């Protein structure tokens, strides 16, 4: 089973060119979609989740037992195998978590009440909301709400799971728990994890793509991608005032403060004078990829 | 600091398009109203008179509530909404500076917006005469700045200050903007309660004081202003208006100060704390995901339908659990309840809480709440998922579009259902509290579920469609409200009322105990189905346009709609559209093919054309009917009537007559003259005008003066299908009521149908119409009777048939009744009647399933009178009152004037489609709503069943014995005399000291009547058309006159007059001049001034008491000292003051102790001193000793004289 996205383009009515001929093949397993804010991640996610029309291009979900699905046309078929956690979502404030989840399960086609009850209860336990299942959703904190969102996405054994910025607003412990939960998801499922947190992808994904300004700028296995830049990233501590000069001379991919001093990473095939080698990681891949397209201001 | 914030607020506001939008809306509204010449006053008042401007502005201030809540609610809410509060208050600003700045900035903006109304009136009035769009282009006065400034300052500013403070304070203190909506609704209630109160004359003062918008106050303060006063005076800021303004500004100030001192940033910033959820931080060991059962999924239409209903339930609960929904609903319910509670009083007397009354209150104020709820909560439902951002989850769920869409609509249906049910719940509640247990649930449910519910559903359908189409909650609300306002405005201001074109409108209907829902089901069901089908079409479109997913632009949705438009959608859409058009065609056939529809404008034009074409025949000689013999066959179920009449006619004129003019004035929609013969010969039709239904036949033989002919006519009148509006009440299933003009053509031109209003007469090129009747010296007028110029007095005989379970009535005494099969082979009941002696040519035919109560009465003069009350079987409650009144009236009139001419008085009831009582010879038909179902249990409330019956019975003398001529003033002989006789009957029954309860209504109606005069006021002698003169001034003047000169002396004069003028068979018929002459001759010299003032002139008193003091003497004696002012003013017919009274007047002075009850349980004033004094104009000090504790004292304390300001006549006595 895999999801094949071909030449997907979308321009919004305000002129924003959100997707520019995006082509991706997303296999089973965990797929990370990395990109800065405004890269088009959410647009792509919403389109796959049937909430948005594309101007051109196609999306096929192939290899399903019930046959291939043309995602852009057969919306209902997509929705039957979909679990979607949007980046921003709300809930009815005056409904309890259990009622709401049960209601969503019903709409997802879970007709058997006993079975549904068991699943709902199990999922609430998985996301650690079982104790508060009878509280109104309006009283939930941000983190609790996010966990509720995860539960609703997982209900009904979806084959295609889309989670858009799922760990935003979660504290480290919760985030960890969420990662574990994602890791539990069965193998024959496509999970698309959209995020701008590189670490999430590092931890979880066997495949990934980086998109920027509506285009796919890198795709592949994270380790392979890191391997590609290994030995090409160099670091140096500089004075903040020198940054402009360095930018003019080198391809600075990131800057960060370390104990009050500014450390820059640059991309170069050979070691520049005064720079030390860096053990490259996915973050360097990411910055390398996006600095080709846009200027990243990091401090 | 304050100033900076103030300036910023102004700058912010004046850069917002909304500010100008609101301004422009008010401007446009008022400009249109004035350009088209609409206004609160009569034709004699300028469109932009200060009176009208004050009225306009006070009404606009009511709408100002919405603007004030929109403008004053947001200035502090803005910081919450945009979350600027989190940092804004960290700036070095003070709380008071912040509040004052924001408040005043917004308030100035609000005043600017409201001034749009003034500018609108000014511009509209300037353009009015230029554009000539109004019916009355010369009623615009030149611009006068003060006429705008004064009411703006005294009415608009205080109202807005109060509203602004409340709204501003509510938001500043609660941090919730929705409360302002609730606040505005509560204020609205204040206004509406005030409106309900003023129905009762006693409560007007209180209502004036309590109306937060001062609209009632202005109306009351100017209630008796004549047109010239309305055109020149601004409403003075004194008295109740001043107190009202102080009250509401004071409340505003209090609220504002409270807000100012209560408000602090910390409280404002505090996070609203919900209940803390208990979280277990340590996750328990849980089963791995893979061990959860694998879901079995079912996707079927059945499952979807189930989900839809369960979702609908969720949505419904979401709506009804909303506290604001409950608040609005509660307000609506209170209105239902109180409207039902105050109910349907007549002369201040309540009616029984009948089920149909409880139902009718739904259209008083409640309907407004229904609109508000349906519009706002449709918006909530449609946008709920978006608003809480649940849509991104919900829209990706594997369910069809119609599921979520349908569930929301079903939830709204649930709301509609809830709303209609409140009506019967409130009704039953009301009935129970009032101890009335005849709950007619069948009627409740038929009306609510059969009619009302569908109107709400239609409303919900359109609103739903609009909300989905525009896909923005706020815009959706605005457009929905605008649509209903346009529909309402076009109907009411532009006089377009073709229901087929007005979404959700149906023809009106009225429930009657006699006739139930009668013939109204068909039009109602047809129209409701028609609109529901259209609503269905809208719903299909809305479903196609339903916003699912992240993209909401109309373009994308249209693209999606094309994708979604599949075969089932096409089939459903086709069925609905075809059904809708089919129903439309069916309705069109009924309304415009089977019947004729005319706009009000067309109807007026038609009248004008009729007059232009046929006025020349007004005075042609026609033979007069002397004997009538009719045969009337009523078919109530089929709604038609067939009549044959033989009319013996005599040429009473001095000239030969060669043609007969027939003029059809039947109210029954389809009338046909099926045959006509004159002395057995069919005459030649020489003029055949089927448009105006005017026909001229050539007499077979010229009729010489004194010659007699026999005219035989057969007619057929019926109702076909249904009409656009109107009750078409003449022939109904139970309770038919027709008069002679509905059955047979009239002879010659009928002036009764002429256009009366001079503004329309001018518009259609007709001369001004000052009078409807000719002068008292006019030979033509003197030779005709007022009620019918086709005959003088006639003899009458007839047979009427109807369905076997109904009783049918004609004038005269029942001779025999029988059952025989009719032309259709079904049995029919026949009744033969014959009238004794002579009568007017003025009769009615009635038929209904009556119960009859009979009683024989032997009058004091020895005459035996059979009293028969034909009533609806359940309307037995007040029958004895009618009987008692008939007895008392027969006795009084018989004793004081002349014997009664018949041996019988019949009172009969007809359905409440019309609201009058009328006196025909020996028969008085009464509408169902007039007394039959009144609650007279409180003796202090006017017993109008008794009173009005006495009036109608008196008409048997005044009208049917003394038949007035067709001249100016002659109707006073009929109406003022019937009023007088009825007042006297009442006086003898209840006593003099309760007559004020009755007379105060006369005074009020006389003064209001002359204030809203469209032409000019006439004197009691010359008045020809004004009811407020013949009823109300007539009552007041004649009552006072008998009080001054003695009842017996006056009655002697009336009796002599009646004996000389009763049953005249030859002209000249009596005039008001002769009547007045008879009165004047009997009045002593000292009182001649009074009759001259009262009958020949327009005279108003302005008596008042200035001071009343008492000192205690020995025992229970008190020395009372009163300072009174006597004042009498004369007016010309236009309402201008022309002079003051100079001579002395006989005026009553009274001192009273505590009120007590008389033997009937009525409250009465208890005079310690009551004497008439001769007082010259000006101030007088009067002193006298009374026994008993003086509490109140006054000049003309019973308001027997016509006093412009009647409530300053009595004051409290200060005991020194």
Image: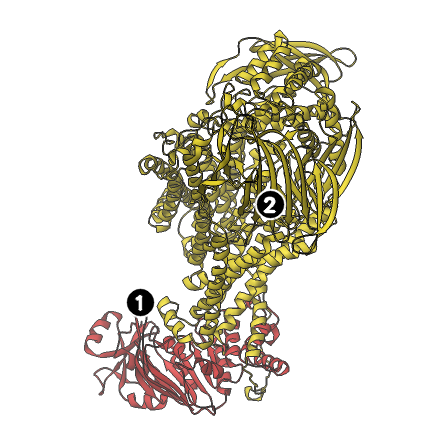
Chain colours: A red, B yellow
The chain ID associated with circle 2 is B
Residue B397 in the image: x percent, y percent? 49, 77
Q: Check chain identity for marks 1 and 2: say if they share one.
A: no
Q: Nearer the viewer, residue B402 or B745?
A: B745
Q: Nearer the viewer, residue A283 or B789?
A: B789
Q: Splitting the image into 4 quarters, where does residue A205 fall?
A: bottom left
Q: Are marks 1 and 2 in contact (CB under 8 Å)?
A: no
Q: Nearer the viewer, residue A64 or B691?
A: B691
Q: Residues within 10 Å of mark 1 (few under 14, many from 20)?
A: few
Q: Is residue B527 visible?
A: yes
- Count numbered badges in the picture: 2
The N terminus of chain B, quarter of image: top left
* B844 with respect to B1023 (left or right): right
Q: Is residue B176 visible?
A: no
Q: Residues within 10 Å of mark 2 (few under 14, many from 20)?
A: many
**Residue B41: assigned label:** none
The chain ID associated with circle 1 is A
Distance between mark 1 and mark 2 Cα atoms: 65 Å
SS at circle 2: loop
Instruction: Please give the residue where the numbered disc 1 appears in the rendered image.
Output: A14
Instruction: Please give the residue where the numbered disc 2 appears in the rendered image.
Output: B730
Q: Splitting the image into 4 quarters, where does residue B145 fall?
A: top left
Residue B472 in the image: x percent, y percent? 42, 61
Residue A179 in the image: x percent, y percent? 48, 82
Classify B1077 as above or below A242.
Answer: above
Tag nearer the camera, 1 or 2:
2
SS at circle 1: loop
* Residue beneath the point at 65% across and 56% down: B824
Residue B61 in the image: x percent, y percent? 46, 40
The C terminus of chain B, quarter of image: top right
């Amino acid at each position: 089973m895999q999801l094949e996205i071909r030449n997907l383009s979308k321009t919004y009515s305000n002129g924003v060119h959100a997707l520019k001929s995006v082509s991706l093949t997303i296999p089973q397993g965990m797929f990370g979609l990395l990109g800065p804010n405004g890269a088009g991640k959410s647009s792509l996610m919403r389109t796959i989740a049937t909430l948005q029309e594309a101007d051109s291009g196609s999306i096929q979900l192939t290899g399903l037992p019930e046959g291939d699905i043309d995602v852009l046309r057969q919306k209902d078929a997509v929705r039957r195998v979909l679990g979607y956690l949007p980046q921003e979502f709300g809930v009815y404030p005056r409904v309890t978590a259990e009622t709401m989840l049960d209601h969503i399960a019903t709409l997802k086609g879970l007709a058997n009440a006993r079975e549904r009850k068991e699943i709902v209860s199990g999922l609430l336990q998985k996301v650690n909301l079982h104790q508060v299942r009878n509280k109104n959703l309006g009283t939930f904190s941000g983190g609790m709400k996010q966990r509720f969102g995860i539960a609703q996405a997982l209900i009904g054994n979806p084959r295609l799971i889309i989670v858009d910025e799922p760990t935003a607003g979660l504290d480290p412990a919760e985030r960890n728990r969420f990662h574990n939960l994602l890791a539990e998801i069965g193998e024959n499922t496509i999970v698309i994890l959209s995020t701008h947190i590189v670490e999430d992808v590092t931890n979880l994904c066997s495949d990934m793509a980086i998109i920027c300004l509506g285009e796919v700028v890198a795709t592949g296995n994270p380790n392979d991608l890191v391997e590609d830049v290994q030995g090409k990233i160099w670091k140096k501590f500089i004075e903040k005032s020198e940054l402009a000069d360095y930018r003019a001379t080198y391809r600075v991919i990131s800057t960060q403060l370390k104990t009050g001093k500014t450390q820059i990473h640059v991309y170069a095939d050979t070691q520049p004078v005064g720079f030390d080698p860096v053990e490259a990681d996915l973050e360097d891949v990411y910055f390398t990829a996006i600095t080709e397209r846009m200027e990243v201001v990091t401090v | 600091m304050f100033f900076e914030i103030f300036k910023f607020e102004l700058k912010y506001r004046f850069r917002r398009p909304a500010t100008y939008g609101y301004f422009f809306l008010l401007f446009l509204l008022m400009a249109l109203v004035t350009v088209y010449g609409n206004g609160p006053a009569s034709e004699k008042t300028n469109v932009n008179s200060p009176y009208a401007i004050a009225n306009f502005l006070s009404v606009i201030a009511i709408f100002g509530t919405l603007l004030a809540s929109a403008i004053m609610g947001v200035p502090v809410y803005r910081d919450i909404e945009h979350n600027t509060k989190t940092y804004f208050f960290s700036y070095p600003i003070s709380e008071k500076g912040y509040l004052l700045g924001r408040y005043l900035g917004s308030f100035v903006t609000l005043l600017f917006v409201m001034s749009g109304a003034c500018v609108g009136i000014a511009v509209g009035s300037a353009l009015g005469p230029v554009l000539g769009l109004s019916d009355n282009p010369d009623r615009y006065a030149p611009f006068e700045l003060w006429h705008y400034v004064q009411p703006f300052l005294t009415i608009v500013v205080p109202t807005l200050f109060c509203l602004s403070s409340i709204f501003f304070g509510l938001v500043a203190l609660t941090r919730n903007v929705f409360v302002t909506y609730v606040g505005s609704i509560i204020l609205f209630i204040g206004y509406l309660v005030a409106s309900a109160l003023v129905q009762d004359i006693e409560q007007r003062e209180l209502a004036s004081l309590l109306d937060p918008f001062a609209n009632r106050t202005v109306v009351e303060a100017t209630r008796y202003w004549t047109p010239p006063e309305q055109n020149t005076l601004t409403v003075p800021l004194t008295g109740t208006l001043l107190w009202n303004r102080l009250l509401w500004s004071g409340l505003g100030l209090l609220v504002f100060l409270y807000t100012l001192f209560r408000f602090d940033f910390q409280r404002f910033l505090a996070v609203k704390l919900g209940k803390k959820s208990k979280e277990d931080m340590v996750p328990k060991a849980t089963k791995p995901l893979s061990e959860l059962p694998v879901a079995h999924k079912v996707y079927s239409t059945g499952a979807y339908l189930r989900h839809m209903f369960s979702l609908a339930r969720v949505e419904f609960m979401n709506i009804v659990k909303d506290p604001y929904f409950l608040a609005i609903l509660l307000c609506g319910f209170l209105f239902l309840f109180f409207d039902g509670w105050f109910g349907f009083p007549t002369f201040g007397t309540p009616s029984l809480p009948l089920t149909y009354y409880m139902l009718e209150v739904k259209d008083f104020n409640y309907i407004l709440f229904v609109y508000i709820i349906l519009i706002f909560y449709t918006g909530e439902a449609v946008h709920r998922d978006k608003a809480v951002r649940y849509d991104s989850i919900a829209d990706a769920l594997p369910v069809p579009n119609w599921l979520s869409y349908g569930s929301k609509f079903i939830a709204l249906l649930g709301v509609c259902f809830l709303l209609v049910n409140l009506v019967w719940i409130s009704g039953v509640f009301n009935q129970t509290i009032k101890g009335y247990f005849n709950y007619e649930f069948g009627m409740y449910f038929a009306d609510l579920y059969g009619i009302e519910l569908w109107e709400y559903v239609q409303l919900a359908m359109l609103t739903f469609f609009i909300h989905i189409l525009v896909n923005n909650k706020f815009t959706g609300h605005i457009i929905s409200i605008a649509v209903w306002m346009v529909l309402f405005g076009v109907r009411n201001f532009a006089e377009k009322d073709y229901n087929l074109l007005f979404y959700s409108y149906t023809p009106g209907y009225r429930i009657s105990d006699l006739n139930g829902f009668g013939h109204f089901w068909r039009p109602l069901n047809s129209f409701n189905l028609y609109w529901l089908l259209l609503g269905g079409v809208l719903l299909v479109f809305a479903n196609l346009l339903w916003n699912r997913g992240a993209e909401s632009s109309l373009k994308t949705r249209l693209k999606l709609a094309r994708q979604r438009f599949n075969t089932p959608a096409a089939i459903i859409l086709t069925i609905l559209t075809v059904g809708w058009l089919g129903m439309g065609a069916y309705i069109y056939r009924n309304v415009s093919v089977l019947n004729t529809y005319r706009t009000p404008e067309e109807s007026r034009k038609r009248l004008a054309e009729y007059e232009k074409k046929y006025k020349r025949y007004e005075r042609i000689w026609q033979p007069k009917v002397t004997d009538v013999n009719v045969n009337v066959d009523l078919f109530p179920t089929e709604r038609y009537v067939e009549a044959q009449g033989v009319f013996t006619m005599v040429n009473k004129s001095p000239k030969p007559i060669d043609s007969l003019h027939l003029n059809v004035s039947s109210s029954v929609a389809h009338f046909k003259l099926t045959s006509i013969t004159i002395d057995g010969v069919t005459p030649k039709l020489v003029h055949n005008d089927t448009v105006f239904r005017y026909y001229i036949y050539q007499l077979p033989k010229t009729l010489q003066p004194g010659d007699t002919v026999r005219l035989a006519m057969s007619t057929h009148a019926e109702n076909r299908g249904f009409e656009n509006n109107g009750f078409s009440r003449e022939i109904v299933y139970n309770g038919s009521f027709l008069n002679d003009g509905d059955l047979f053509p009239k002879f010659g031109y009928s002036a009764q149908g002429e256009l009366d209003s001079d503004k329309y007469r001018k518009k259609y090129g007709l001369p001004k119409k000052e009078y409807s009747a000719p002068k008292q010296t006019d030979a033509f007028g003197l030779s005709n009777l007022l009620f019918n110029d086709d005959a003088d007095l006639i003899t009458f005989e007839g047979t009427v048939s109807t369905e076997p379970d109904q009783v049918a009535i004609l004038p005269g005494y029942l001779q025999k009744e029988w059952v025989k099969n009719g032309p259709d082979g079904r049995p029919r009941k026949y009744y033969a009647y014959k009238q004794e002696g002579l009568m007017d040519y003025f009769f009615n035919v009635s038929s209904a399933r009556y119960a009859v109560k009979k009683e024989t009465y032997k009058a004091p003069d020895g005459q035996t009178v059979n009293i028969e009350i034909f009533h609806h079987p359940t309307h037995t409650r007040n029958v004895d009152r009618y009987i008692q009144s008939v007895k008392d009236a027969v006795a009084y009139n018989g004793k004081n004037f002349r014997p009664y001419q018949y041996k019988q008085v019949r009172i009969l009831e007809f359905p409440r489609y019309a609201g009058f009582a009328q006196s025909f010879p020996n028969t008085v038909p009464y509408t169902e709503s007039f007394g039959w179902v009144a609650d007279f249990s409180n003796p202090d409330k006017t017993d109008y069943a008794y009173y009005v019956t006495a009036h109608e019975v008196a008409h048997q003398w005044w009208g049917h014995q003394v038949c007035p001529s067709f001249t100016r003033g002659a109707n006073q002989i009929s109406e003022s005399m019937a009023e007088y006789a009825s007042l006297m009957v009442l006086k003898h029954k209840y006593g003099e000291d309760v007559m004020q309860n009755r007379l105060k209504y006369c005074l009020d109606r006389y003064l209001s009547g002359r204030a809203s005069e469209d032409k000019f006021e006439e004197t009691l002698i010359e008045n020809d058309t004004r009811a407020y003169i013949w009823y109300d001034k007539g009552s007041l003047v004649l009552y006072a006159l008998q009080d001054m000169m003695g009842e017996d002396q006056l009655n002697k004069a009336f009796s002599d007059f009646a004996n000389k003028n009763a049953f005249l068979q030859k002209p000249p018929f009596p005039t008001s001049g002769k009547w007045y002459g008879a009165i004047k001759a009997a009045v002593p010299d000292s009182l001649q001034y009074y009759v001259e003032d009262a009958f020949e002139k327009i005279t108003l008193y302005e008596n008042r008491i200035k001071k009343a003091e008492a000192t205690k003497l020995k025992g229970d004696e008190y020395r009372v000292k009163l300072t009174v002012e006597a004042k009498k003013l004369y007016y010309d017919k236009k309402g201008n003051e022309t002079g003051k009274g100079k001579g002395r007047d006989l005026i009553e002075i009274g001192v009273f102790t505590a009120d007590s009850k008389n033997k009937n349980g009525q409250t009465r004033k208890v005079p310690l001193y009551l004497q008439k004094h001769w007082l010259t104009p000006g101030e007088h000090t009067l002193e006298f000793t009374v026994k008993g504790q003086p509490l109140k004292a006054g000049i003309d304390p019973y308001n027997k004289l016509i006093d412009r300001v009647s409530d300053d006549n009595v004051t409290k006595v200060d005991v020194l």
